[in-house]
Image (spheres, rainbow, N blue to C red):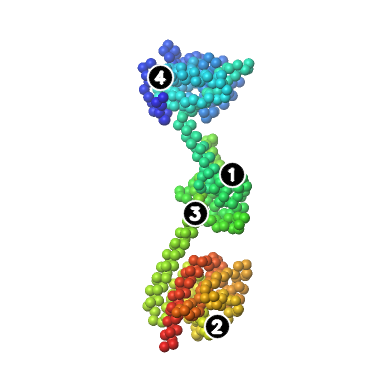
Amino acid sequence: MGASRSSGTTDELGPDEDSGGGPPGCSADPGPPAGDGGIPGEPPGSELLAALLDGMDAALCAFDAAGTVTHWNREAERVLGWTAREAVGRTGFAGWAVRRADADEVRARLMSAMDAPGRQVHEFALLRKDGGRVLVRTQSAGVRGADGQPAGVYCAFSEVHAQIDLERAIALSEALLEDASWGVALVDVDLRPTVVNAYAARALGGSRTALLGRPLGELVVQGVEELEAALHHVLAEGAPSAPAELWVTLRTAEGERRRCWRSGFLRLASPLTEEPVPLGVGWLFRDVTAAKLAEQEADRLRFRTSQLHRAARTASECEDPMEAATSLLDFALAGFADHVLVDLVAGERLVRTAATPFDAPGPCLPVSGGAIPARYGPGHPALRSVERTGTVRTSAGAEAAQSWAAERRWPRDAAHALCAVLRSRGRTLGVLTFLRAANRSAFERPDAAYAETVAARVAGAVDLAQVTAGT
């Protein structure tokens, strides 16, 4: 059956085949018109049946027990080009809708459904009115009369490529909504999930059924406004041209988790209406948190390395070693902390030697009027850093940041602190204290490593300043 996948491609007919109205000696018009898809002599009440048949998306024809065409709807006319007036009343497909060489086989296979249980599926090469051939997939089943005896066959058919496209679309949707390696969620116009696949359920922290119909605000603690704004935009304007990266904080049984989702959106519209009616949004996303954090860390490391390089070059041009130390700290502060304090060991106590302004951003400068004792109470983080000869990190936590900072003799906006000990030639020279405000994140392990690198360079400059002052 050398049928083309496209119904518009034609094959030449054989010498015994007629592209017109039927076998030799038969008229192209087999009898009186039967209405649009109706049966000759049918009662007036059959207009509803004819309308229903014509409104179907599938091509449909029916045969009586003798094999005569009794019904032919508009979709059958669209696929093959033969009108109901031309088709109804013909006996089988021979000579007009199928080649003569195939006619007996096609008829036998179609009519066999009259006596067989259930539906039968076949593929045939049928002839279009313009002479082209089209491969169709048919589903046929027998029709019983009022007495229970076989009365005919009905046959629904569609072009094979259209059927395959439909099956592929269904298979794709089922695969996406079952075991895809990225999240898929269908969101209705009220922005509530209606279907989620397994990946999306895990990402949102719930089961596939428990998430349905719940507002997104119940699942997302922070970032829900950006997500809902993206969904509203898709409903109103259509899908964006590129994926979007959304940072959200989720509420889970283990606590809050911050995640980054690379998201794509599709506006869903009903294919059954003339005007596109929005059904919601198809939201496809993938968790890229690990990759984004690694990318941010790499960017941070490159920036800090560049700052240390610039700081070393600037410090090398300073005649005064303490000026070199404060220059190092000015470069280190950029993007890292809001304040820095330099407390040096003097006997049994620490004295404030240099600091940034307490009330406004500014450079690290020596304390005016000379070093003054740092009035730190027992257990102060700076004292613990000196005692441990290591780094100490701390944050205000649930306490009021201003009172927490005031008790530790720090600027009142401080909420996170990192104390790194200054050591050179095996001696503890003092401690560096980096401070961040409450609107910034707490210091982490990578921050501690960076602070220790800065402290080692500052300690070398401070040691040189002390040696120079003693000579």
Please state which of residues 415 and 78 is positioned toward the viewer in this rendering: 415
Report the Cα–Cα distance between label 2 and label 1.
66 Å
Three-letter code for the amino acid on which mark 3 is drawn = Val
The mark lying in front, picked from 1 and 3, is 3
Name which of mark 2 and mark 1 comes first in the sequence: 1
Name which of mark 1 and mark 3 comes first in the sequence: 1
Three-letter code for the amino acid on which mark 4 is drawn = Ser
Three-letter code for the amino acid on which mark 1 is drawn = Thr
Residue at horizontal 50%, vertical 76%? 421
Q: Which residue is mark 1?
A: 194
Name which of mark 1 and mark 4 comes first in the sequence: 4
Report crowding for label 3: few under 14, some 14 to 19, many 20 or more residues within 10 A (C-alpha). some
Residue at horizontal 45%, vertical 84%? 466
The mark lying in front, picked from 1 and 4, is 1
Q: Position of residue 419 (x, y in %)?
A: 53, 73
SS of the residue under disc 1:
strand
In the image, residue 343 sits, relative to residue 293, either above or below, namely: below
Please state which of residues 102 and 132 is positioned toward the viewer in this rendering: 102
Q: Which residue is mark 2?
A: 349
Q: Marks 3 and 2: in contact by CB < 8 Å?
A: no
Three-letter code for the amino acid on which mark 2 is drawn = Arg
Report the Cα–Cα distance between label 4 and label 2.
109 Å
Q: Which residue is mark 4?
A: 19
Residue at horizontal 47%, vertical 77%? 423
The mark lying in front, picked from 4 and 2, is 2
Residue at horizontal 39%, vertical 75%? 314
Q: Marks 4 and 1: in contact by CB < 8 Å?
A: no
Name which of mark 2 and mark 3 comes first in the sequence: 3
